[in-house]
Image (cartoon, helix red, strand yellow):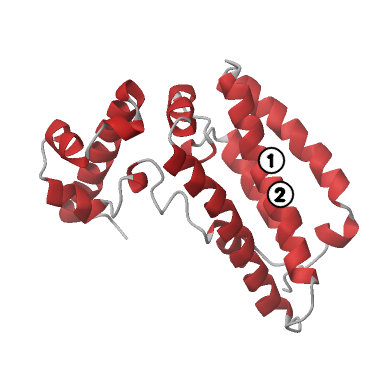
Amino acid sequence: MQEGLRERKKRQTRQRISEVAIGLFVERGFDRVTIAEVAAAADVSVNTVYNYFESKEDLVLPPEEASPQRLAEIVRERPPGRSAAGAVLARLRQEIRDRERRVGLSAGFGRVLQMMRAAPTLTARLEELGRQMTDALAVALAEETGAAEDDPLPRLVAWHIGCLHALVYAEIGRRTTAGESPDAIAAAVLDLLDVAEDLLGERVLTYAVREG
């Protein structure tokens, strides 16, 4: 469906507010910038900022990019013949090859990462987000496979996939902090995923294969 004028203007306003906010946060620190200052710099009202972002943290970690349902949604959207772990591996590889902002491979992400690490509320939110992703994935796997309530297998498979997902972000963060280029980071993390896939083992890699 083609984007209408109103939707395009809303998307552009939201993007402008986010970009202005992140620029201020990087320059001065997340905790030293108020929503009122973000609104003034973006030339909108404070109410407009809150209409687009429910919290200050959402300006850096918008729900559509940092959703607790991310892993569960990847698994639900997988094609026939692909397992849960295979779906997540395929998505991560694609996002890395495309140098997506979602995985931290866009230009200038190094300074954003430093800002995030210096803000306790953002680091706490990232940690909680990781737990929520794994929990949501476990629920999705249990529902799809019809596992009994006391069956630990969906939770264990979700834990392995969640750890792999977290490892990718941690490795990208480590290499970004070390000053490596996005291209070099992408190549190294793709190699890391190959090794990680071998280590996961057949039991995890073949769990919850979607039927055709």
Who is closer to the viewer here, 194 or 154? Answer: 154
Query: On the rendered structure, is 81 left or right of 50?
Result: right
Taking 9 as reference, is 190 above or below it? above
Q: Secondary structure at mark 2?
A: helix
Give coordinates of residue 70: x percent, y percent. 54, 57
Q: Residue furthest right?
A: 202
Mark 2 Cα within 10 Å, few/some/many (few <14, many 20+)?
A: some
Who is closer to the viewer here, 184 or 79? Answer: 184
Q: Which residue is mark 2?
A: 163
Q: Which residue is mark 1?
A: 167
Q: Amino acid at mark 2?
A: Cys
Taking 3 as reference, is 186 above or below it? above
* Residue 160, quarter of the rendered image: bottom right
Give coordinates of residue 118: x percent, y percent. 46, 30
Taking 91 as reference, is 176 above or below it? above
* Residue 82, quarter of the rendered image: bottom right
**Label 1–label 2 contact, CB within 8 A:** yes
Q: Residue at x 35, y 25 (%)?
A: 26
Give coordinates of residue 179: x percent, y percent. 57, 15
Q: Residue furthest top?
A: 179
Who is closer to the viewer here, 157 or 210? Answer: 157
Asked if residue 112 can be seen in this view, the reply is yes
Q: Residue at x 34, y 27 (%)?
A: 29
Q: Amino acid at mark 1?
A: Leu
Query: On the rendered structure, is 85 left or right of 98?
Result: right
